[in-house]
Image (cartoon, rainbow, N blue to C red):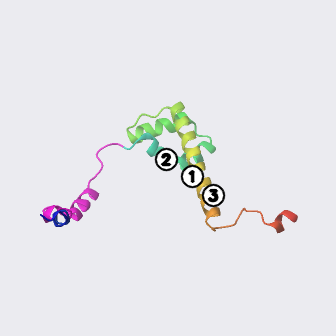
Amino acid sequence: MDMGNGFARNKTGFGGAIDIESLKTGLRQLQPTRKPTKIGVLRELLGVIDEMLDEGVTYADIADFLSKKTGLEFKADPLKSMLSKLRKEAQALEERQNSDSNNTGGSTEGIPTNASRNA
């Protein structure tokens, strides 16, 4: 019995009975049935929320607005904590991207040169 040929025959997609590409297409067409997470909503709105906070809107007002519009329960103090976490996350990502571009021969902007040190 030739074991190699049996293995090759079995790995070709279950004898052609299941169309994997069709399954992938079908899965991509599924619509979400669960609500987004609070942190996910805030991640998408972080820039706008920070703008509104800078203009004097309170955390409580933002929490009330988001609760009414999303159907998720937001409260001021946890909102403040989640936003702080997201700001740290965004800062870490930015630093990592800057580090990656500096380490891979990317932009040299912001890197002192000998000429700039002596000026």
Range of magenta residues: 10-35
Return the x and y of residue 95 as percentages of the image width and height.
62, 53
Q: What residue sits right under mark 2 in the picture?
A: 43
Q: What residue sits right under mark 3 in the picture?
A: 99
User: In the rendered image, is residue 114 in sight?
Assistant: yes
Amino acid identity at mark 1: Leu
Amino acid identity at mark 2: Arg
Task: Say whether residue 108 is magenta.
Answer: no
Point out the image quarter for the N terminus.
bottom left
User: What label does residue 104 carry, if any?
Assistant: none
User: Label 2's element?
Assistant: helix
Task: Say whether residue 12 is magenta.
Answer: yes
Describe residue 23's horizontal placement relative to residue 107 as left or right.
left
Return the x and y of residue 78 as percentages of the image width and height.
51, 32
Return the x and y of residue 61 as percentages of the image width and height.
52, 36
What's the residue at 55%, 50% (across, down)? 47
What's the residue at 15%, 65% (across, down)? 2
Front tag of 2 and 3: 3
User: Label 3's element?
Assistant: helix
